[in-house]
């Protein structure tokens, strides 16, 4: 199984809503990532979890809150978002071995903030 | 985010030609370098990686690395229309950080 599954595929929310994006992998990978991608731009790293601990937070606003309940699951909790947060949110996983840069991406969750 | 610049596109080449994609990076601590391809509406996928200075070939793809110049490139020989995509350079410094470059959109014209 080489899949990274993201749900939901599409999400529309208001600025006062609270919602969550979910990501799951069953490849035994120990590193999981959240990226944000705006149209015609490269993916922008947000968070990295390594062995279920947050190892990188790229100065992401606190309205985005990541959570890694176990080694297979990664959540991104969303609260009080702004319209400019509308983007494709990509989850990825990797083995976590240093120097191994192969990330396996999910299909993404397209978020629209009204 | 680390600075990773790629040649501005879009880049158009005729079918069968060589496409040359370039990338410069600012972090001298970068040790490993990855090239990803992203088709429109799809997620990125790994094409190849390179660790050592010099050339590395994999089928129609050749990656070239010069750490002294902080430069990495990807050559695609015998370009095919199916190679039309955005190519992302990604240097890696630590164990798990992977920052993508600005990306180059390639169009191969039949």
Image (cartoon, helix red, strand yellow):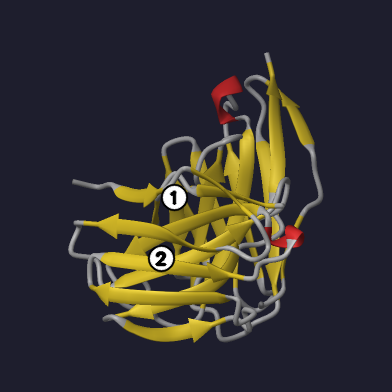
Q: Are marks 1 and 2 in contact (CB under 8 Å)?
A: yes
Point 49% across, 78% down: residue: B31
Q: Badge 2 is on which residue?
A: A101
Point 18% across, 64% down: residue: A28
Helix, strand or loop at label 1? It is strand
Residue furthest to the top in view is B110
Q: Are marks 1 and 2 on the same chain?
A: no
Which corner quadrant of the image does residue B73 belong to?
bottom right
Q: Badge 1 is on which residue?
A: B46
Q: Position of A18 compared to B3: left or right?
A: left
Q: How many marks?
A: 2
Which corner quadrant of the image does residue A68 belong to?
bottom left
Q: Is B5 located above or below residue B46 in the figure? A: below
- Mark 1–mark 2 Cα distance, whole angstroms, equals 9 Å
What chain letter is assigned to the residue under label 2? Answer: A
Q: Is A38 located above or below residue A98 in the figure? A: above
Location of residue B68 in the rendering, given as x and y in whole percent from the top left corner:
65, 79
Location of residue A21 in the rendering, given as x and y in whole percent from the top left corner:
44, 59
The answer to whether residue A112 of the structure is visible from this angle is yes
């Amino acid at each position: 199984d080489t899949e990274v599954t993201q749900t939901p595929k599409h999400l529309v929310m208001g600025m006062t809503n609270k919602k969550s994006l979910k990501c799951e992998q069953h490849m035994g990978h120990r590193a999981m990532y959240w990226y944000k991608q705006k149209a015609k731009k490269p993916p922008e790293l947000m968070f990295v979890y390594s062995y279920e601990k947050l190892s990188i937070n790229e100065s992401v606003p606190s309205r985005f809150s990541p959570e890694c309940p176990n080694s297979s699951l990664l959540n991104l909790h969303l609260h009080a978002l702004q319209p400019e947060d509308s983007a494709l949110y990509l989850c990825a996983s990797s083995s976590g071995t240093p120097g191994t840069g192969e990330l396996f991406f999910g299909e993404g969750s397209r978020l629209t903030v009204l | 985010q680390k600075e990773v610049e790629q040649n501005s596109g879009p880049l158009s080449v005729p079918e069968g030609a060589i496409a040359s994609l370039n990338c410069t990076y600012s972090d001298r601590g970068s040790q490993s370098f990855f090239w990803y391809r992203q088709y429109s509406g799809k997620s990125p996928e790994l094409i190849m990686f390179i660790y050592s200075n010099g050339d590395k070939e994999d089928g129609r793809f050749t990656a070239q690395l010069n750490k002294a110049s902080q430069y990495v490139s990807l050559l695609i020989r015998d370009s095919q229309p199916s190679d039309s995509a955005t190519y992302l350079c990604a240097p890696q410094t630590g164990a798990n950080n992977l920052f993508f470059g600005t990306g180059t959109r390639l169009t191969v014209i039949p």
